[in-house]
Amino acid sequence: MSSGGYLDRIAGPERTPSLNHQLASLLALVAGILNSVGFIAVAFYTSHMTGVSAQVADQLVLGDYYLVGVGLLSVASFIAGAMACAVIFNWGRRRGLRGRYANVLLLEGVLMLVFGLLAEELTASWRELVFIPVLCFTMGLQNAIITKISGAQIRTTHVTGMVTDIGIELGKLAYRNRTPGLDPVQGNTPKLAMLASLVVLFVLGGVIGAAGYLAIGFAVLVPCALLLVVVSHRPLMRDLGARAEDRA
């Protein structure tokens, strides 16, 4: 398959488990990079809504209402990202667009590109209030689109869920079917391998993000952003071409 044909399929509307895994691998790497950049920059894990929710509860009791506000802002931004994904996806789906998924990936890429190029210009006093909502919105956007693409089978920012599923599959593989006549318990080795690879890629992304941020700052996000734009552009170009034909 040519590179053009592959790019048309990787973010296109016709999905296969293999394509889903390949796209999820890219997004897990990107999520790890974003998460580590957010932590190094403002000491905040922007993909970890469980921890953020716990922080809100803790700081309510301790009386640090600024951190409560930051936590609530991050959760709201994550939700807003998922909402934006649903709106954009369903808008494209109802119109039969090939770019129903690619539109969301393009938005994520553009957000990352603008953020990577301009974040250094912000003064320190504004960093938390801008960085956290932007990165959380992007994480919500990404988690929602891979959920849509995979039918809620894959998450790229939710490592807790992936590790839980890894444990379940390992438990199935360890189970010994000693009672004849009952449905056997069988582990899903391909699923286990996929989940393990996504966790490894998330961690690898974290290493790249942390090392890259310390070396070149927010510019480390620019190659990731451009990669998402490249991955998403072919279905979008097909839609634009079809629209031009309809107008002709």
Image (tube, rainbow, N blue to C red):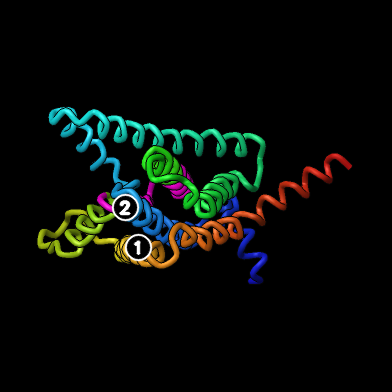
Q: Which mark is residue 210?
A: 1
Task: Find residue 14 and report its horizontal and vertical position in percent.
Answer: 58, 52
Task: Find residue 116 and report its horizontal and vertical position in percent.
Answer: 50, 54
Of the 4 image quadrants, the one containing the C terminus is top right
- SS of the residue at dot 2? helix
Residue 194 visible within the image: no
Q: Residues within 10 Å of mark 1 (few under 14, many from 20)?
A: many
Residue at image point 17% right, 54% down: 182
Q: Do the residues labelled 1 and 2 touch (CB within 8 Å)?
A: yes
Q: Residue 73 carries which label?
A: none
Spatial separation of the CA atoms under disc 1 and disc 2: 8 Å
The residue range painted magenta reads: 141-160
The residue indicated by pointer 2 is 39
Of the 4 image quadrants, the one containing the N terminus is bottom right
Which quadrant of the view contains residue 117?
A: bottom right
Residue at image point 53% right, 47% down: 111
Name the side, left or right, on which 243 lies relative to 224: right
- SS of the residue at dot 1? helix
Q: Is residue 155 magenta?
A: yes
- When the figure is inspected, residue 87 is found, relative to residue 233, above or below; the finding is above
Residue at image point 67% right, 66% down: 4
Residue at image point 57% right, 37% down: 88
- When the figure is inspected, residue 128 is found, relative to residue 223, above or below; the finding is above
Which quadrant of the view contains residue 246?
A: top right
Circle 2: residue type: Phe
Residue 248 visible within the image: yes
Task: Find residue 168 and report its horizontal and vertical position in percent.
Answer: 21, 55
Circle 1: residue type: Ala
